[in-house]
């Protein structure tokens, strides 16, 4: 294992870096597309889309609430798939583990947004920020589960130990997604039933509202992709630093908390 | 727009949280990769 001088920030075993950061031309394009998507979503969500007959203006909150919830589901699903590939493939590539970790981190962010924004919508629609309803409670439980997953990733040990134990946890945690999604069917719930992903395929929604929701999903998907790519590259760099010199990584962590 | 505080607040919370996380990721990436040689960055 090579070691790097703890006092240097640029000297490396093979020479100083000429590039820093995790950006490439493709990620810059992706980031620009995500920003366009956000602006478009804000314009349609806050301006062009009509008020709802029943929910009135509060329906505008759903254009960020619903996509963030869907993307959190997707992020946790990607975490499970990447974890499964890591565990069951012969190669046990840590790239899959890092993809799982990055996706879970972004998923937790989106799930947190879902809960906070959902509480704002609930206050306008139900008159309360929070209710111990089946959908809300199971969503909060899933949020806490994935915070636990991220905590497990930060426990000590080798990269392989981290990958193995977090992969097992990810494969168990993903079972919560169907529970959360169908909680409105399984139990009596204050939360409304699905409007778009209905089993009968009959979407009862105004065209412009549906389009705005679609814009939201696209914008959130672009944000998710951009964040995950950068985060998993950062994790790869962190692992490389760990391999190159544990002392340097510890100094970096200390500097981060100062 | 009625309830503008809640509605605009929900967008501010959403994009504020994503923006703050994105900035943290970029700053962390810059700090960590500045200590690595280019050949340890397969994306370059």
Image (tube, helix red, strand yellow):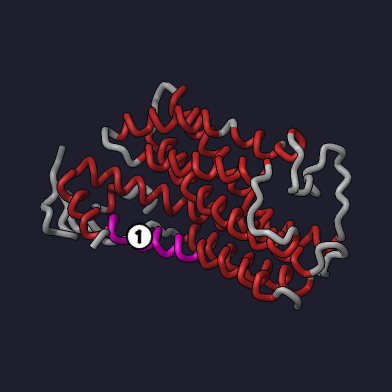
Q: Chain of mark 1?
A: A
Q: Residue at x 74, y 40 (%)?
A: A184
From the viewer's perspective, is residue A40 above or below residue A183?
below
Q: Dot 1 lies on which element?
A: loop
- The residue lying toward the viewer, choosing from A10 and A66, is A66
A23 horizontally vs A116: left or right: left
Residue A149, visible in the rendered structure = yes
- The residue lying toward the viewer, choosing from A136 and A166, is A136
Q: Residue at x 68, y 66 (%)?
A: A41
* Residue A97 position within the rendered picture, expressed as x and y whole percent measured from the top left: 41, 36
Which part of the image, by quadrant, shows the N terminus of chain A?
top left
From the viewer's perspective, is residue A82 above or below residue A40?
above
The total number of labels drawn is 1
From the viewer's perspective, is residue A173 above or below residue A17?
above
A86 horizontally vs A206: left or right: left
Based on the displayed image, in which of its 4 quarters is residue A120 positioned? Answer: bottom right
In the rendered structure, which segment of residues is drawn in magenta?
B18-33
Magenta includes A81? no
Magenta includes B25? yes
Q: Residue at x 65, y 39 (%)?
A: A180
* Residue A247 position within the rendered picture, expressed as x and y whole percent measured from the top left: 15, 47
Which part of the image, by quadrant, shows the C terminus of chain A?
bottom left
Residue A215, visible in the rendered structure = no
Q: Residue at x 84, y 65 (%)?
A: A52
**Residue on which the image places disc 1:** A21
* Residue B7 position within the rendered picture, expressed as x and y whole percent measured from the top left: 68, 70
* Residue A204 position within the rendered picture, expressed as x and y whole percent measured from the top left: 88, 52
């Amino acid at each position: 294992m090579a070691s790097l001088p703890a006092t240097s920030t640029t000297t490396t075993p093979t020479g100083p870096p000429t590039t820093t950061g995790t950006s490439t031309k493709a990620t810059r394009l992706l980031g620009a597309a995500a920003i366009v998507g956000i602006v478009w979503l804000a314009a349609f969500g806050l301006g062009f889309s009509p008020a709802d007959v029943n929910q009135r203006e509060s329906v505008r909150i759903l254009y960020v609430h619903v996509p963030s919830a869907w993307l959190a589901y997707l992020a946790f699903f990607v975490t499970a798939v990447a974890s499964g590939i890591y565990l069951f493939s012969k190669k046990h590539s840590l790239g899959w583990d890092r993809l799982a970790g990055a996706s879970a981190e972004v998923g937790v962010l989106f799930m947190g947004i879902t809960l906070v924004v959902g509480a704002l919508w609930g206050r306008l629609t139900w008159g309360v920020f929070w209710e111990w309803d089946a959908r809300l409670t199971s969503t909060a439980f899933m949020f806490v589960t994935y915070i636990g997953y991220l905590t497990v990733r930060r426990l000590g040990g080798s990269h392989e130990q981290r990958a193995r134990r977090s992969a097992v946890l990810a494969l168990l945690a993903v079972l919560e997604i169907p529970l959360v999604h169908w909680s409105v069917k399984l139990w009596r719930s204050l939360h409304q039933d699905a409007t778009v992903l209905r089993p009968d395929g009959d979407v009862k929604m105004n065209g412009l509202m549906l389009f705005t929701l679609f814009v939201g999903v696209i914008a959130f998907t672009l944000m998710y992709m951009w964040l995950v790519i950068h985060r998993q590259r950062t994790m790869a760099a962190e692992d490389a630093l760990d391999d190159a010199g544990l002392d340097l990584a510890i100094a970096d962590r200390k500097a981060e908390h100062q | 727009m009625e309830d503008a505080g809640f509605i605009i607040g929900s967008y501010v919370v959403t994009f504020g949280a994503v923006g703050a996380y994105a900035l943290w990721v970029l700053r962390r990436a810059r700090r960590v990769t500045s200590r690595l040689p280019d050949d340890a960055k397969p994306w370059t």
